[in-house]
Image (cartoon, rainbow, N blue to C red):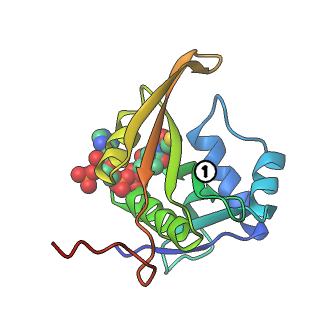
Amino acid sequence: MTWQFRKAMLDDLDGIMRIENATFPEDAWSEATMRSELESRNSYYLVGFDPTAPDHLVAYAGLSLAKGATQADIQTIAVEASLQGKGIGGSLIRQLISEARVRGAAEVFLEVRADNEPAIGLYRNLGFEAIATRRGYYQPAGIDAIVMRLEVAAPKGSFTEWDRS
Ligand SMILES: CC(C)(COP(=O)(O)OP(=O)(O)OC[C@H]1O[C@@H](n2cnc3c(N)ncnc32)[C@H](O)[C@@H]1OP(=O)(O)O)[C@@H](O)C(=O)NCCC(=O)NCCS
């Protein structure tokens, strides 16, 4: 199966919220929060779909990076439950990292629940390293958040030091 991805638009709000509510039944973002993410100039959201059914979104992920900033944050990511483990989440994160690089980020951060092994496994595979723990961050369950960080290489064509020795 081939999946396609495109930049999210405000019209995608309903499709994104359907996945959001199904994926995070206890702590889903409100529609207002998601709307302001999609509207923000500092955000870059992607949605995924099967090209034969482009109106049915199966995944989304979002990046936040203020203009001129060098630190980007992966804000959220979710893949429809029946389609997890097929590489969609990995593709989304890779594309967000790529966009962060193009926008001048030197580092990408994210927070993940300490009990979310699939997500932590995915981020590790992509080069993220755990740098801190926020105790009891996810309420009401009181689950810790692991803060992870990825160093982003400068885009090709920019100046890099060259060791001639
Ligand atoms: C986390 C999530 C976005 C990953 O997306 P995905 O499409 O399922 O991930 P991928 O298929 O790209 O998986 C890539 C890697 O993730 C890990 N992974 C994914 N699903 C896994 C599972 N069920 N068990 C263990 N590891 C898993 C593996 O390391 C996998 O590597 P592989 O290529 O060797 O299989 C998705 O599972 C999801 O939506 N989960 C619920 C919401 C969520 O937890 N969001 C993250 C909040 S921080």
Left or right: 46, with 34 as reference point: left
- Identified at 63% across, 33% down, the residue is 25
Task: Report the front residue among 24 and 37.
Answer: 37
- Secondary structure of the residue carrying tag 1 is helix
The relative height of residue 157 versus residue 111 in the rendered view (above or below) is: below
Give, as a three-letter code, the residue at label 1. Answer: Ile
Q: Nearer the viewer, residue 99 or 163?
A: 163
- Image quadrant occupied by the C terminus: bottom left
The reply to whether residue 79 is visible in this rendering is no
Where is residue 151? Give x, y as percent. Answer: 42, 54
Residue 1 lies left or right of residue 57; in this view the side is left
Q: Nearer the viewer, residue 163 or 98?
A: 163
Q: Is residue 131 visible?
A: yes
Left or right, residue 41 beside residue 153 = right
Left or right: where 118 falls relative to 64: left
* Mark 1 residue's CB less than 8 Å from ligand 1: no
* Residue that extends furthest to the bottom in the rendered view of this protein: 157
Residue 99 placement: quadrant = bottom right
- In the rendered image, which quarter is residue 154 located in? bottom left
Q: Position of residue 63 (x, y in %)?
A: 61, 57
Residue beneath the point at 60% across and 70% down: 103
The quarter in which the N terminus is drawn is bottom left
Identify the residue at horizontal 33%, vertical 54% (top origin).
126
Q: Tell which residue pokes out farthest to the front in this image.
A: 165
Farthest-out residue, left = 165
| Relative image position of residue 101 (x, y in whole percent) | 50, 68
Q: Which residue is mark 1?
A: 19
Front in this rendered view, residue 138 or 19:
138
